[in-house]
Image (cartoon, rainbow, N blue to C red):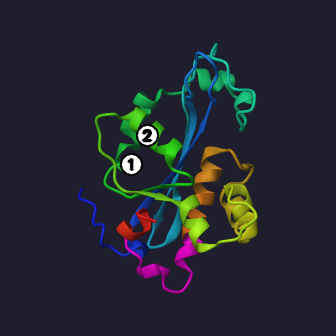
Amino acid sequence: MAMDLTMAIFHAEITVLDYESTGSLRGFANEPWQIGMVSLKNGKVDPVSMFESLLRVDVNRPFNPHAPGRHSMLRDQIAVAPTPEELWMQVRSRLTGYPLCAHNVATEKKFTRLMAPMHKFGQWIDTLRIARKVWPGCPSYALEDLVVLLDLKLRVDDLCPGKEAHDALYDAVASAMLLEHLFEQPGWGNVTVGELASM
């Protein structure tokens, strides 16, 4: 599916995603252990599209002790979760042919490319870069702080009961809520996919 970069972002379907990872340790590359994603359709978060999965990490592979998230409580489940390659066929349709979005996209770009190195992915929209331009002067641009500063936390919590920051689905929904909030501001519904991706 060809991506129309001139389409108004409000009318595009956007896949927002987040990974949680092991963190790096000497002798061990950083690996994802959880993925979460949700779609924005016509400028609104689509709760039906919410998806999450653990990703396999060898049970003997140490995690960086500073890596956030609930991984220490889930090691047995993580050890038997699907590998990124095994999960690919399930998520492929969500990750190809659509703009992709994350908060500070470098990690998500890296892990998504590792999942399917032979595939080309669409434009990436970075809610961190956008937030710095649209809401200058915030005391913090960490995702968990922005949703509080912009009064979005209750909406995220309602969609992700029992979850909190540094859960992949929670963070994907939080990033999506940032975009939804942006589209509610005057004039932002007419910004194109290409313009937003280049910010």
Q: Position of residue 130 (x, y in %)?
A: 54, 66
Drawn side of residue 110 relative to residue 146, left or right: left
Mark sitting on residue 95: 1
181 within the magenta span: yes
Residue sitting farthest toward the top:
60
Q: Is 42 a magenta residue?
A: no
Mark 2 highlights which residue?
112
Mark 1 lies on a secondary structure that is helix
Residue 16 visible in the picture: yes
Of the 4 image quadrants, the one containing the N terminus is bottom left
Question: Which residue reaches farthest bottom?
Answer: 186
> Type of residue at label 2?
Thr
Callout 2: helix, strand or loop? helix
Magenta range: 180-192
Q: Going 63% across and 16% down the picture, which residue do you hit? A: 59
* Callout in the foreground (2, 1): 2
Residue 94 position within the rendered picture, expressed as x and y whole percent measured from the top left: 39, 50
Front position in the image: 40 or 9 = 9
